[in-house]
Each structure stands twice: as structure tokens, then as C-alpha cells.
Amino acid sequence: MSRPVRVGVVGAGGAAQVVHLPILAKLRDVEIAGVVDLREDMARTIADRFEAAGAAASLEALPNFGDLDAVLVCTPNDSHEEVALSALDAGLHVLCERPIATSSEAAARMVDAAREADRHLMVAMNHRYRLDLRHVRNFVRSGEIGEPFLVRASWHTQREQRSRRGWRRDPDRAGGGVLMDLGVAALDAVLWTLDFPEVEQVTAHFHEGRRVEDAAAALLRTANDVTVSLDVSWELTAEGGQGVLFALGSSGSAETPPLELMKEMETGPADVTPPLEVDEGNVYTASYRHEWESFLRRVRGREEPDDERERRNGGREHVQVMRVVEACYRSAREGREVRA
């Protein structure tokens, strides 16, 4: 494919406007072929802003629908499956915002549909493209940390932002609260770092807010005896947000941010932290660009090793993540430890 990849953007909310469209507008090998939103006037406004070729209230109604190569799904969680299945049925590749869906059953249907259509279905877990987290993952998977036995992931955002959460506070549309919003990404980061071991036991506790949980904490045990601690909330009383991933092993530890890799040597603990290729404060922003570069390689058939590995896995890890999330909700609801 030598021409630009033609991408249709479905859902003209914050994720599309603030994150994805500004990146797509700067990529020379991409054409923003259309913007879709149920609020068609909004779709046309955003399409004009980013010089997209068309706008419509539904994907199929785009004048150039038949010319699309791929679709970005930025709609509320409960419609991810419908939009993705429609795009896959039309032979299009799909990049879907997280979470993949609101249930593991829906996630499995989407993964199966992508396999049957021989199209790429990628979930926008942008933390997998953070350079600091990639160093942590490589440190853990290479065995330099020794046998990992404890991993903690934490993500907290500002309290005053909750008035802007909109549909994310509607359990029918979002599928849950902060666990579905921040927890899915934090959990994926942990399991991705550990190479997706089976999770056997889950204990979770929630702080219930308005209609959905505002804070969630979970303790997981994997089949290879790694304890995972997860805590997320929308209730941080501070500027900005705070998030960390920490891994402890028999001969080392890894943490970010800031990135720090420590390894037990004959002479004692040694700091083996490599320099980052980008400023530490920009790793999160840069991850979205790297995510798009990966997706576009797949669309063009120019996969790199990590792309190929995920394709061979068929997206099943996203079904696994949703099963663990469902176990967390079940544990919190029933007040007991459950099997994932």
C-alpha cells in the first residue's frame, strides 16, 4: 500500500479531539477520511477542524465509506462491539479505545470476528508503547530481576475532574466506574509486563461513588505465584495525576516513573537504569504516537516482532483482562475472594 492509509474516526469526543486526531493530522502517510458522531453537527465541526474528507452520523453513511482502510473507535464503551463488528464486517482494520468492550463475552466475539475477517483488531493500550514501561517489561521478562513475586500498579486522577466524566459515570454505557476506566489499563500494564500469566484468585474492594465506584483496590494471585496489587481512583486531591508500576523480584526491582532498574550484583545493589530516548515527562504523550505507528505498520503489512507476536496471540489477552476485571467486580459485590 503506497497511498496514505484512509482512517475513519468514530466518536468525536475528548479522546478523538485531544489525543488521536492531532496525531493523525501530523502523519504524512495517513488521510483522515471522515469523522462520525451521533451528533452530526459535532462530526462536521471536528471534520472541518482537522480537514477530514467527510462527516456523518454513522459509519456507513460516510460518503467515502467504501474507500476506508481502517477505523478508530472512540465511542462510549457499550458501543465498541457494535462499531468494531460493523467495521470488521466491511473488511476494515480497527483500532479500538480501551476497554475493548464491557464484558469478556463481547471481547471474545470481537476477537473472533477479526480473526475470521483476517483484519487487525488492536486495542489502544498506549502504555505498552511507553519507553519507560518497555524497559521495565524487558528487565522483568529477560530474568534480570530474578523470579518476580510482587507487582504493583497504581493510577489516580484528580477529584475535580469527576464533573467532566459524563457517560463514564453511567454503568450501562461504561460498564463500571474507575476500574473500567483506569483499572483496565493498569491491569493490562501489569499482565503485559509479566507476559500474561493466568490469574487464579482475585480479592477486590470498592469505594462507591455516584452510580459507580470512585476508587478500587484489588489483590490478585497468578498461577506462577506472583502477587499483583492494583489500586485506582478518581479521588486524588492534588494537581495532575499519579501513577506507578513497581516490580520486585528475587534479584532486582524495577519502577516507573521515574524509571529505576536495580539489580543485585556481587558487589551489592547496582543501578542499571538506561537513559530514555525522550524526556521522562513526555513518555506518556509519545506513547500515543508510537501506538499509531504500530497500528499503521500492521495495516500496511510491515509488522515488527511485537506486532507479530500480538497478532499470533489473536487479541486473546484482552479477553483475559476483561475476565479478571469481571472477577474484581464479582469479588467486590460478594465481599469474598473469587476465582478469575
Image (cartoon, rainbow, N blue to C red):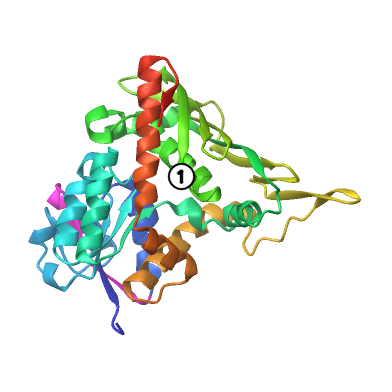
Task: Give the x, y percent position of residue 63.
Answer: 9, 67
Q: Is residue 132 left or right of residue 108?
A: right
Residue closest to the eye, 296 or 148: 148
In this orientation, which residue lies closer to the viewer: 126 or 337?
Answer: 337
Q: Which residue is mark 1?
A: 188
* Vertical arrangement, residue 253 with respect to residue 283, above or below: above
Which residue is found at the position 31% from the left and 47% from the top? 100
Residue 156 place in picture, x, y as percent: 51, 33
Task: Name the residue nearer the viewer: 195 or 128.
Answer: 195
For image coordinates 29% across by 40% down, the residue present is 104
Q: In which quarter of the view is residue 239 placed?
A: top right
The residue closer to the viewer here, 273 or 138, is: 138
Q: Secondary structure at mark 1?
A: helix
**Residue 32 part of the magenta-drawn span:** yes
In the image, what residue occupies the spot 40% across and 77% down? 302
Task: Please tell me which residue is depicted at 11% across the width and 63% down the height of the picture.
Answer: 62
Q: Position of residue 7 (x, y in %)?
A: 26, 67
Q: Is residue 311 visible?
A: yes
Q: Is residue 164 magenta?
A: no
Side of 149 relative to 313 (left or right): right
Residue extending farthest top: 335
- Magenta stretch, residue numbers: 28-45
Q: Quadrant of the N terminus?
A: bottom left
**Label 1 packing within 10 angstroms: few (<14), some (14-19), many (20+):** many
Q: How many marks?
A: 1
Is 89 above or below relative to 230? below
Q: Amino acid at mark 1?
A: Asp
